[in-house]
Image (cartoon, rainbow, N blue to C red):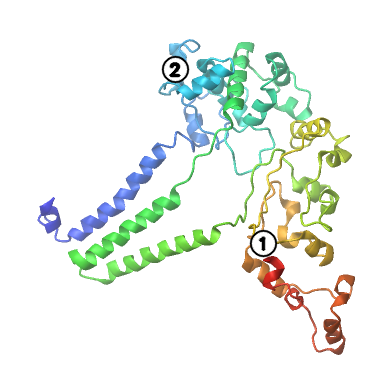
Amino acid sequence: MRNFFRGRLGTKKVSFRILLVVLIIPFFYVKFAYSQDDSASVSESTMVAQQPDDTTGNQNSENEAIIPGKDSAHLSETDSAASGHEETTATPGEIDHAVSEGHEIDEVKRGERFFRGLLPFRSESQSCVSCHNIRQVDTLNWNPSAHDIAVKYAHMDFAAFQNAVMNPTGVKIQASHQNFELTEDDLRTVKSFLDNMAAEGPVASKPSYNNLILFLFLGLLLTWAIIELIFLKKIKWKFIPVILLIGAFGWQIKMIVTDAIRLGRQENYAPDQPVKFSHAVHVGENGIDCMYCHTTVEQGKSAGIPAANLCMNCHIIIREGTNSGKFEISKVVEANETGQPIEWTRIHNLPDHVFFSHAVHVGSAKLDCATCHGPVEEMDVMRQHSDLSMGWCINCHRETQVNFEENDYYDQYIKLHEDLKAGRIDTITAEDIGANDCMRCHY
């Protein structure tokens, strides 16, 4: 090692070898990190490759491939070998959940393989996972997720579950389950898997470490550049480590500043909701006005969330959606009948020290909803369109012209009306009437 740093291994440019090591280390780190991901990002082509050519390969790429556990009581040695996976032992937590629901862990594991389409090997019908996601996905899947199904049928007996799968009543589900091939014993294992999922909760998505890896890699470059400039001094052209030093340090600063600015902001935040409600369908296709559902937007601080009985004004007749079938609408019907409100996830959040009122902006200023919320009529999954930062609000107040002439709310601004009539000013913005006064939002 001493000879290596002194340049006695036949290469005078020892710094080049150090740089090479610095570049190679992150590669192996990334490779190791992804190898520990438990197949969370297995692609569709990989999943199909693990099955025989004549099995169904219509899997969702967002769902991970199953690594079977030991289930010798239910799976023959031939089937185990054909599955092409290394067997693992179930954890104590898995056993506790499975046993608490009255199912053996081997039965749960086998049911998961049937759900993912890994069994039966000679099936010509689509697998369950081709329609029902096991993991959360970024795009809207109109079909209910595996967890939704698990929760709905967790407290129902097998006969009800079997009837729903094998003899569905909805038009959409009938088309999907046509020629569905699954024996009663195999379907029981699927029910076991879903019961266990209902007890454990949905499968969590794995976090991404890409930014952390990039930050550490830039730190290695920065460290090497400093060592080269101060101690090694092996590179003839000093501008090379200087450029690397400035570039790596500058990029790290940019990453820190960007993430610091994002703290508390949720631009493009689009969480999963308990009901797959599409604004594109309701607002875009059917032309429902925003204020029909958000009834308090002109008088209250909040726009309000419609109660289930308001939804029933339409869904008392419409019980099956074109895209989602009966499953999602049945959630609304059940909420209305039981009186249990739907627990929607709030999307637009402001810090606690900020005051905002829809009544002022919509009721008084007559702003259009799209000014802040964007093209809602195009969103299947509702997301936060603007970053809602203080700078964004201040700029909006500076640029938004107030309609003084046709709004009685602004009659109190007598001086500004006189200036308009006299021609001393031609436009009035929200800033001119004190919208950017600190105490308007922070008091």
Residue at the (69%, 66%) spot, across then down: 441
Residue type, mark 2 in image:
Lys
Which one is in front, 409 or 16? 409
Residue type, mark 1 in image:
Val
| Number of numbered markers | 2
Q: Quadrant of the C terminus?
A: bottom right
- Left or right position of 111 against 341: left
The residue indicated by pointer 1 is: 354
Residue 181 location, x and y as percent? 64, 17
The residue indicated by pointer 2 is: 70
Which one is in front, 42 or 126? 42
Relative to 395, say whether 149 is above or below: above
Residue 52 in sight from this viewpoint: no
Residue at the (50%, 37%) spot, across then down: 43
- Left or right position of 211 against 362: left
Residue 215 location, x and y as percent? 39, 55
Residue at the (28%, 54%) spot, across then down: 22
- Residue 270's tag is none
Q: What kind of element bears circle 2?
A: loop
